[in-house]
Image: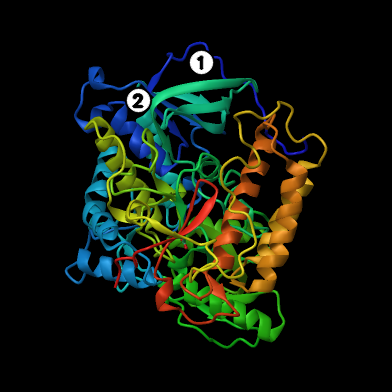
Amino acid sequence: MTRPGARRPASPALPTSQSLPDELDVLVLGSGVAGLSATVRLASPPEMGTSPSDGLRVGVLTKAELWRSATRWAQGGVAAVLGGDEDSTDLHLADTLAAGAGLCDTDAVRVLVDEGPFRVHELIAMGAEFDRQPGGALDLAREGGHSTARVVHAGGAATGAEVERALVDATRRTAAAILEEWFALDLLVEGGRCCGVRALDAEGRVVDVRARHTVLATGGAGQLFAVTTNPAEATADGLAMALRAGVPVADVEFMQFHPTALHHPAMPRPLLSEALRGHGALIRDANGERFVDELAPRDVVSRAMAAKLSSQGVEHLWLDATGLDSFSSRFPTIKASLEAIGLDPHVDWLPIAPAAHHLSGGVVTDLSGATALPGLWAAGEVACTGVHGANRLASNSLLEGMVFGARLAEAIRGGDDGPSPTGAMRAVLHGGHDARDPDGDFGAGVSVRSGGAGQAGGAAGGAAGGVTAIDVEKTVGRLQRAMFEGAGVVRDAGSLQAATTVIESVATAVGTATPSDRADGELANLVTAAEALLTSATLRTETRGAHARADFPEAAHRWRRRIVHVDGRVTVSSEAVDSP
Ligand code: SIN
């Protein structure tokens, strides 16, 4: 295999497959904000007011080191109502619903904005240090789509790193078993219940890790695209495992592109935080003219930029932060990364172009994080709780991980099992309309596979050996380019079909054998997720939020529904989403 870092020796201090109990109480997959927010509450940290004897047997399985999650890359911050009189949770709710473009679940957003401030304070109590004003009050920033300043941040624009540091430290104070450099291949499903995962351990051996409850907290899918702000780990692993197990997945056509990624060969693309625009940075076209409200929601800004890039025939536009006196003190980490490549933000305009950043959809959950498969839970970017709708509001994602990671931990501790018809789960439990029904309203023109059960990468039943006949790195690059060209900021039927053709040929080359290492497994997961995204994007014949169709440029009322993948089929929810 040609990808670096696929296998490394385990630290001798870490648990091995032999030292794990026959069955864990909870297995958490992923070590970002959502997974560790759940872990610290399940594995009885002293901060939560429980004694060690209350602890469940918890394992955290992560494909890299514990701290190496996408969370640590988050810049801007955590949006929560913690500050002045001019803000309220009603306003945060209204901003989130407006950004979500008619597909948010209002109850889920209410949970997010109401519980968010408490979870931020809990994180502070756990040791997280956010930036403060001279008088000691939390310093609040404004970002696109927010009607006021409500984003707490750390180290200027290094918020994710501080959140991750605090949670990793807290996790290490628990008795949770930490399985670093392990790679989950697929969910184990027996008798209609998830009972753990089949995984490659740190030595590359196939091991079944059994658990009464399994938590998907595997993060995002930015690596589906050739241009992304996401780290190499963001390969849609949990999403693909859920699709293969037939667990409902929704809203995956809504990949959000961040407008102000630095246009530079580095991958992931260095991010120029939205907080810069909150402080007054301006977006300029190739002629130096402004053309968009810099503080509009992210989908609006990215779409306006895509139109400008195309009409002016250029590869990038400009972020002008030269008017920000406080750049060096307020954004030291961004300043340092710019300096490293010879740019001085006090003097230079910064070249920018949109980059894949955050998947708004994912594995469908109820308001407690339960998926439709008993024993399986999901939180964070891998989940579709309903809070983001068609376009996530800036800085709502760390918050979502904190709030819903904690909620699912409390639900597991409280003995909950199986989903309730709340949040995005309503789209599943209230039934759906089969999108392939030729007599239905929604089926025309869909010719791609769903990315569902039994496709590439399935652990159960596949012959060992993995993808041996192809160059994995080159194949990943081919997939990423096809997705960026065909399913980028603006799509149409032709571009989606072109991408689909490439992905189908990649899927054939990859086959269905059990992956033999992490690189194989990630490629299989990217294929599965790409198929699902392309199917949904082809089916949704409208423009809404982060899904912009050049051939259907308006939002259509009949599409205020979720496209749900379940058991290899694609359905459209029968009820319109409850969102203003
Ligand atoms: C940013 O700092 O611009 C990213 C914040 C986010 O994605 O929510």
Tell me if residue 265 can be seen: no
Amino acid at the residue labelled 1: Ala
Q: Determine the CA span between mark 1 and mark 2.
A: 15 Å
Dot 1 crowding, Cα within 10 Å, few <14, some 14–19, many 20+: few
> How many marks can you see?
2
Pick the front one: 211 or 290: 211
Give residue 500's position: percent from left, percent from top: 69, 60
Left or right: 513, with 424 as reference point: right
Pick the front one: 404 or 402: 404
Label number found at residue 449:
none
Dot placed on the residue nearer the N-terminal end, 1 or 2: 1
Q: Quadrant of the C terminus?
A: bottom left
Label number found at residue 173:
2
Tell me if residue 156 can be seen: yes
For mark 2, give the secondary structure: loop
Would you name the residue on which mark 1 appears?
13
Q: Residue at x 76, y 52 (%)?
A: 505
Q: Residue at x 67, y 81 (%)?
A: 310
Q: Quadrant of the N terminus?
A: top right
Q: Residue furthest top?
A: 18
Q: Residue at x 28, y 58 (%)?
A: 80
The colour style of the image is rainbow
**Is ligand 1 within 8 Å of the beta carbon of the residue shown at mark 2?**
no
Give residue 71's position: percent from left, percent from top: 46, 47
Q: Is residue 310 above or below residue 180?
A: below
Left or right: 538, with 512 as reference point: left
Give residue 177's position: percent from left, percent from top: 43, 21
Q: Is residue 156 above or below residue 559?
A: above
Amino acid at the residue labelled 2: Arg
